[in-house]
Every structure is written in structure tokens, then in C-alpha cells.
Image (tube, grey):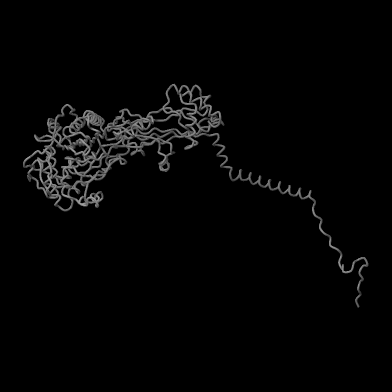
Amino acid sequence: MSTLTPLPPDLPPGDDLPPRRRPRRPSRRVLRMTSFMVIVLTLMGVLVARLWFLQVIGGGEYQERAEANRLRTVVTEAPRGAITDRTGAPLVTSREVLNLVADPQQLAGPKGTAVLRRLSVALGHPPGFLAAKVRKAQEARPFEPVVLEKETSPALQAYVQERGGQLPGIRLKAAYVRDYPQGALAAHALGYVGPIPAESADRYRERGYQGNETVGRAGIEAEYEQYLRGIAGREQLEVDARGEVVGRGILSQTPPRPGQALRLSIDLKTQKALEAALRAEVVGSGTSTGAAGVAIDPRTGAVLALASYPTFRPDLFQSGSPRDVQRTLNSPSRPLLDRAIAGEYPAASTYKVISAAAALESGFYTPGETIRSPGNVTLYKTRFQGFRNIDHGIIALPEALEVSSDTFFYELADRSYRRQGWPLQVWSRNFGLGRPTGLDLTEGESRGLVPDLAYKRRTCDRAVDPINCSWRPGDSINMSIGQGNVLVTPIQMAVAYAAIANGGTVVTPTLGRAVVDADGRVLRDLVGARASRPLGLSKDNLDLIRGGLERAANANGGTATPVFGGLPRPFRVAGKTGTAENPSGIDHAWWVGYAPADDPSIVVAILVERGGTGANTAAPVACATIGAYLGFGPNRCGTGAKAN
């Protein structure tokens, strides 16, 4: 039997268990100490982690930054390659100059501002002029030197050298500028250089440029930039906190690599003669607004001379004042327009050789056939006049080219219009019209225009003049003598006549002849790789046309015989005059041809805006140009021709 233990008498009823002991709360002092220790440990952990990151993870980067603070990389500009004529005579060279430059990082703060203010006053500028120039340059390229003054004078160089310690952050830096021993000669062909345009900076950087170089902006300078550009050199210098060279000075050095020299096909004496004759004709006429000329070797397409007048100074965009640049850009005479490759004009009677080729090869004219050539003819109820209404009687094709009969070619045009296949358009394109010739000045060459039915439909207004949306007989008639809508450039006509002169090959004209090294050895031939193609004109038909062109410059009735007829047989010329109608005033004058007639080595195309008749204005320029190349001199050329 179990026994119950009685409850202690002091416990209240129901309190069967002893009471639990409640935990004591830590004091505020203990809490504060604990929090403080947690914060200290956390901060120590962050500090340790940061030190570990700086030394282990970012150590290499910060070491490079520290190294960069005591090292400076100086870029050494490289000269561009020279450009010469075919014999090596210099046309463009590079000349070393000293520019005054500022290092923006060393000119920060009040001291730098004071230096720039003092220098501005010394140079004759307003006190804040150079500081503003530095700020503007820093916005574009914050870490690059700023050019304060280009091509410094000896006096300024002496000033800076004597006060070097007083002008921290200011120094003289070698640079190169383009020099032109022949002045403005061949300016349109050579082009010019300038800074990289802001909109093209990314494209240039992709090609390895830094973005602040001087590059070819037009002409040959731009076309052959890949050869002419130099590769900049670099020097690594040890400097102190002020940027002064200390210690070992130059730590490493990569010398600049000059650009390669470019030899052009231009013949200097021929270029000079062409430019002088064009200038004299334009200035002497009193009515002409400009002129252009091209001379090429018909055997290779090598350009012997290329000129446009008015012209410009090729150093204008390098060292000309902003006012001079704007004056040239805005001039109404358009001196920057290269009329030789971008001027588009009606071909006038120089086009008649193409009409002749179309008639012969398409079979609607038979060699030896004679056609009546009155002063005017009526076709499709419309009267078409010949030049000065001269009646040439009954003549064959060679005589028609000799006297430049319009009405003879009107008859051929009527036959062409009745034929299918668009023979005038086909042969225009065979000769290279209506598209760029491929000259190595690709940025500026015009296409010209070979009009056809598609062109008429593109340009007509069906609502106003639906009849003009079709190809009409008058379109072919006008086109046959190089009038109407047909447009050509002088370089296109030179290429077309080169195909006649060389026996039937359409060549690609080229200015670049070779890339050469410092000793003149050819590194790359630029002429031999140029494309050519057959014209497709039979030898018999070609000989017939060549005979007519020789008569036009030498026979009794030749339109240019007064100019060329007195030349000795070895220098005998063949070619065609042209007088292009000008809706805005006096006619444009043409002459295109070649010499010697028996074995051509030069083709010349001359265009004189508002020059009147081709025989009186353009032919004498051509004779002077041919004479300079072949060596017979301008005194042998005749004058006074009045025919078209």
C-alpha cells in the first residue's frame, strides 16, 4: 500500500511545483559594449576585404595607374609621302615645322590660367583667347595636346625656349605641313589635306588612326591615302609630378614611319602648258566663266595633264585663314569644281564620231555613200538648220567630219530613229559615255547623260506634256550632233577619242603611276592593273573615222586647219571641233583629238565655257598642250579659225 507525502504547510493550495527562476536582462552598458564590438569587427572585416581587393584583385591595375603618373607617352608625327610627276619632279612634299602646343593636364587651376593669359598677351591675343581655345579643345579630346599656334616664327620659338621655366605645360612640338613647289599647279588633281572630319572619326579609328591626324580630304591625297599616310612614332618618357622629364628620360622609343612616295603619270611641262593656255583663254575672252582640259596617253590611259580653271591654292585648307576658306567655298566662279571630270556639257560636234560609228556598225550607212548636205533640212515638218546654213553639197562621211556638216548627220539620225535597238545610245555607252570612266579620283567624277526613252519618262510631266514622254525624231536628230539632252565631261571625251586613236580599246584613265621607295624603286605599279575593254568597232570603219578626223585638222575645208594645218608631218594632228549651244548665253567651245595622227601618243580634250566656236577658242589651247608634250612649241600653232 502506497503512502502519500503531505504538502509542506507553507505552500499555498494548488502550487504543486517549486517556482521557475526568470532570466535576468543584460544591462544597458553590456548592450552598448556588444554593439560597439560588432561595429568594430564589421569595419575591420570591410577594411580587410578592401585591402585584399586592392592588393590581390586590383593590384595590377593600380600599379599601371601609378606607373602612368610617372610616365608620359609622346606621339611623334610622321611625314606624308611626297607626290611627284612622271619624271620624279616634286609636286607635293612635307615640310617640318614647330607648333606651339599646350598640355591641358599641366594647365589646370589658377597657375595654368595665368600662364595662358600671359602667353595670350605676348602673342597679341586678348587675355582669355588661349584659355578659351584650350577649353574648347579639351571638350573634344581632353587628354591630348592642344595646338595654340601653327608654324611658329623663329621669334616665337626663341621666346618660348628662353622662358621654358615660366611656361609650364607649354612646349614646341615638331609637325609636318604639305608644301607645293609648283604652287597651285594641278590643284584639282592633287587635292588637299585637312583634319579628320568629326563625322568620319569612327571610320578612321577603325583603320588604325588616332583621330587627330591630318589626312587626304580630296583628289589624289584622298585617293591614295593608304600609301601617303605615315605611321606615327612613340616615345615613353619618365616625368615628375609637374610633368618634367626626370631620371632616365626616354624609356622606350618607336620611330615614326614616313609615308610612301607616289609618282603620278602627269607630265610637268604638259601640265604647265595646259594650265597657262586655259587661263589665257578664259581671261582674254572677257566672256568665259571657266575652262577645263585633259591629256591622256591613249595606249595606257595614263593622264598626262588634267586642269580646271578657275583654280585654288591646295594649301588653303591647311594654312589659309577662315576668311579665305569661306571666300573660296562661296565664290560664284566655283574654283573648287573640277570641270575636267565633274563639269557636264553638251558634246556638240565632237559627238559626231559616235554617230558615225553607230551608223557604220549598225549598217544604215555604207562606206563611200554620199549624202546631200544643204544648209538646212526639213524633217517631220520641222526645219533643222546646219551651222551658219552652209551648203556643203554632196559629201561622204570623211568630208562630213572634215567640214562638220550638221545636215549630213541629221540624215543619219533619221535613219537611226527608224532602226530598232537604239544605236546612238548603244554606241554612246560603248564609248564610255553615261558612266564614270574609272579615273582614280572616284569621289568627284560625274556620270554625264546618255538620254533614252527611260530618261524621257523619268523627267517628263505626263499631265502637262504627255507627248514629251516619248522618244521623238527630234531627240535623235539633236543627239546626232551632240545637242539635246546628251551631257559629257572632258575626261569622258578624252577616253572616247583614245579608243579611236589606239585602234579600238577603251582604256581606264589613271593619274597614279607607281608607289616608289626613297630610292625611286617601284613598289607597286598603278597603271598596268587598270582595266580596258574592246570598243567593238571594225578596223575598216575605224580607219574611215580616223581619216575624217585627220581631214578636219588638215584639209582645205577642215574646221581646225587654220590652227593645226601648218604643223610638220611628224606632228600632224587629227581631231574634231565642237560648238555647244548654251541656253544661258554664249556657246561653249570644244576640241578633242590626238597626235601624231599616224601613231598617237597623246589625246587632248578641251572645253571652254562660253568660249564661242571650238576652232577659235578650244583648238589653240589643245595645240599648245600637244606642242608642249611632243616638243614643237606653241609658235607653230596657227590662229584665226572661225568654223565650228
> In the figure, is residue 82 to the left or right of 5?
left
Tell which of 118 and 162 is nearer to you.
118
- State the residue lying farthest toward the left: 394
Is residue 601 visible to the viewer in this orientation of the structure? Answer: no
Give x and y (percent) for residue 602: 20, 36
Q: Where the C terminus falls, by quadrant?
A: top left
Q: Is residue 17 above or below residue 81?
A: below
Give x and y (percent) for residue 63: 57, 39
Tell which of 516 and 372 is nearer to you.
372
Is residue 584 visible to the viewer in this orientation of the structure? Answer: yes
Q: Quadrant of residue 317?
A: top left
> In the figure, is residue 301 to the left or right of 217?
left
- State the residue lying farthest toward the right: 9
Q: Is residue 310 above or below residue 9?
A: above
- State the residue lying farthest toward the bottom: 1
> In the figure, is residue 487 to the left or right of 360?
right
Give x and y (percent) for residue 580: 19, 39
Q: Quadrant of residue 522?
A: top left
> In the figure, is residue 395 to the left or right of 297?
left
Q: Quadrant of residue 218?
A: top left
Q: How many marks?
A: 0
Q: Where the N terminus falls, by quadrant?
A: bottom right
Tell which of 123 and 206 is nearer to you.
123
Give x and y (percent) for residue 72: 51, 34
Residue at 10% across, 44% down: 377
